[in-house]
Image (cartoon, grey):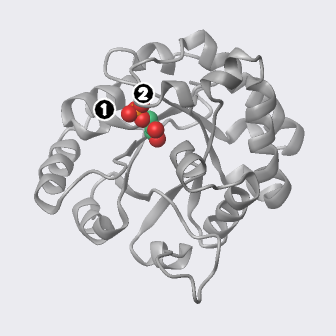
């Protein structure tokens, strides 16, 4: 982490939760936030945004969504627009998560448009990039992550100073296999250089790591100069583990 950037720890609940469980988990997280100063967000399934807005009200916790429509409004059954998310106090929206790229066919261009919609609504897109295991083993990591980020830079121009980038190696997501701090830092530095070439404000853009980040490995990852926080899946469903990660980011 660099002292010039405020760390961000965001939980991604994915398709987990329920009204009662959400309340218990969120209240436990909120009650443990006092000692920390970093930004903390929970990205929850859309039906729970109203609940999360109420639970986060008056606390340091910020509300996040897991996706946003690339369209502004209209006949797009099942889609949720950026303006609708904003109505529920959403501050962050994940775009381009590898699970959406893989299972829902999201292309780099669609992801870039989603980021654009979020930005236009005053929501910070958490733009996910990351290579698969096959791509890493073929030596394609740099090419893949730069291609994914380039689409977002191309579509959003100078507005990219308002995004957060999440490096999430696909082979590390939900597998218990974490990138080593050195592996992660290496990719973060590449992404930082790419952002610098595109924006005079790149030094303030946060690049967070995601992929089996947990209570045991967070401190080492967060100690890297270009790792500005975490996007946490499984460990965000356990208050104690999530809080340990938050406290490692202070
Ligand atoms: P895990 O922390 O469960 O590996 O998930 C990471 C992730 O995909 C966050 O968006």
- Which residue appears at 82% of the width and 60% of the height? 155
Q: Quadrant of residue 227?
A: top right
Q: Is residue 224 left or right of residue 47?
A: right
Depth check: 51 or 134 in front?
A: 134
Q: Nearer the viewer, residue 166 or 201?
A: 166
Say what secondary structure mark 1 lies in: helix
Contact? badges 1 and 2 (CB < 8 Å): no
Q: How far separated are the C-alphas under marks 1 and 2?
A: 15 Å
On screen, residue 189 versus residue 180, left or right, reads right
Badge 1 crowding class, 10 Å Cα cut-off, few under 14, some 14 to 19, many 20 or more, is many
Tell me where residue 220 appears, x and y as whole percent: 46, 12
Q: Which residue is mark 2?
A: 249
Crowding at dot 2, Cα within 10 Å, few <14 / some 14-19 / many 20+, comes out as many
Q: Which residue is mark 1?
A: 235
Labels in figure, total: 2
User: Residue 179, percent across and down?
Assistant: 53, 17
Q: Nearer the viewer, residue 141 or 32?
A: 141
Mark toward the viewer: 1 or 2 = 1
* Residue 33 seen in this snapshot: no
- Residue 162 position within the rendered picture, expressed as x and y whole percent measured from the top left: 67, 54
């Amino acid at each position: 982490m660099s002292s010039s950037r405020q760390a961000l720890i965001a939980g991604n609940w994915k398709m987990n939760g329920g009204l009662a469980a959400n309340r218990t988990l969120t209240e436990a997280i909120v009650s443990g936030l006092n000692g920390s100063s970093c930004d903390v967000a929970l990205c929850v399934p859309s039906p729970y945004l109203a609940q999360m807005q109420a639970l986060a009200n008056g606390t340091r916790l910020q509300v996040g969504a897991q996706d946003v429509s690339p369209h502004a409004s209209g006949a797009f059954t099942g889609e949720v627009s950026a303006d609708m998310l904003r109505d529920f106090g959403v501050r962050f929206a994940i775009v381009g998560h590898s699970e959406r790229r893989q299972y829902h066919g999201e292309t780099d261009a669609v992801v870039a448009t989603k980021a654009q919609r979020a930005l236009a609504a005053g929501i910070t897109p958490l733009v996910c990039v990351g290579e698969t295991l096959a791509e890493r083993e073929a030596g394609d990591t740099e090419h893949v992550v730069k291609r994914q980020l380039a689409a977002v830079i191309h579509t959003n121009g100078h507005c990219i100073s308002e995004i957060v980038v999440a490096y999430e190696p696909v082979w590390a997501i939900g597998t218990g296999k974490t990138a080593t701090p050195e592996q992660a830092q290496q990719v973060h530095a590449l992404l930082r250089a790419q952002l610098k070439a595109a924006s005079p404000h790149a030094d303030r853009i946060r690049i967070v790591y995601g992929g089996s980040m947990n209570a045991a490995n967070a401190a080492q990852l967060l100690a890297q100069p270009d790792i500005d926080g975490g996007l946490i899946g499984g460990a965000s469903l356990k208050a104690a583990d999530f809080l340990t990660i938050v406290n490692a980011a202070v």
